[in-house]
Amino acid sequence: MSYYTNLTPAKAVVGGMSAGAIGQFFASPTDLVKVQMQMEGKRKLEGKPLRFRGVHHAFMKILSEGGIRGLWAGWVPNVQRAALVNMGDLTTYDSVKHFLLLNTPLVDNSVTHSIASCCSGLVAAVLGTPADVVKTRIMNQPRDKQGRGLLYKSSMDCLIQTVQAEGFMSLYKGFIPTWMRMVSAF
C-alpha cells in the first residue's frame, strides 16, 4: 500500500502524460504506416489504385516522398492522443483501485481490477477518441511535394473543421470499440 501514498494525482497525471507522449513520439513512424495501410482497403473498394505492396514498401515510399521528416507526419496529434489516453488510463486506474481498496470491503482481486479497468478505459476513451479522430485524419490527408497537409494546417484546424462540418459527436466515432479495447488491455 505504500505505493499509493507516494503517488499524488499530479504525479500520476505528469507521469502518464509523459510516458504516453515520449513513447508515441518514437512509435509515430510505425503508427503512420499502420494508418496509411489501413486506408488501402478503402482505396481498393473505391476502385483506386493501391499505394503500398506491404509494410516495407510503405516505409520506403513514405521515406522517399517525404524524407525522414515524412515518417513523422502527424506526430503532433499522435503524441497529443497518447498523452491524453495514458493520462486518463493510468491515473484513473490507480485512483479507482486505490479508492476501492481503502473505502470498500473489496480486496485486491479480479473484481477490483475489472472495476478499475472499466473506469480507466472509459476516461481514456473520452479523452482519447477525439484526438484519435484528429490524428487519423491528419495522417491520412493528401500532402504536397514538401510534405505539408493539403486539408488541415494543424490539429486545432482539423478539430474545428471536423466539428463545423460534422458536429461535435463526430469526434467520438468509434468510441465504444475504443473503450472496449482499452478495458481489455488491462
Image (cartoon, helix red, strand yellow):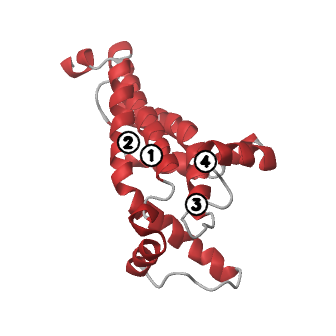
Q: Is residue 68 above or below residue 131?
A: below
Q: Are marks 1 and 4 in contact (CB under 8 Å)?
A: no
Q: Looking at numbered disc 2 in the image, what kind of residue is underneath it? A: Gly
Q: Quadrant of the C terminus?
A: top left
First in sequence: mark 2 vs mark 3? 2
Answer left or right for 107 relative to 49.
left
| Residue 33: percent from left, percent from top | 45, 68
Instruction: Please name which of the two marks, 1 or 4, marks the residue nearer to the observer.
Output: 4
Question: Label 3 sits on what residue type?
Answer: Arg
- Say which residue label 2 marks: 20
Residue 148's disc number? 3
Q: Earlier in the sequence, mark 1 or mark 4?
A: 1
Q: Nearer the viewer, mark 2 or mark 3?
A: 3
In this view, the mark in front (3 or 1): 3
Q: Quadrant of the N terminus?
A: top left
Asked whether the viewer can see residue 72, the reply is: yes
* Distance between the alpha carbons at the discs numbered 1 and 2: 7 Å
Q: Secondary structure at mark 1?
A: helix
Closer to viewer: mark 1 or mark 2: 1
* 158 to the left or right of 31: right
Residue contact between numbered discs 2 and 4, judged by CB atoms under 8 Å: no
Task: Give, as a three-letter code, the residue at label 1.
Answer: Val
Q: CA distance from mark 2 to mark 3?
A: 25 Å
Q: Say which mark, if any, is on residue 154.
A: 4
Q: x, y percentage for residue 167?
A: 78, 44
Q: Position of residue 90 (x, y in %)?
A: 38, 34
Give the number of marks.
4
Q: Is residue 10 above or below residue 14?
A: above
The front one of 161 and 169 is 161
Q: Residue at x 53, y 45 (%)?
A: 179
Q: What secondary structure is marked by label 4?
A: loop
Specify the label residue 79 is tagged with.
1
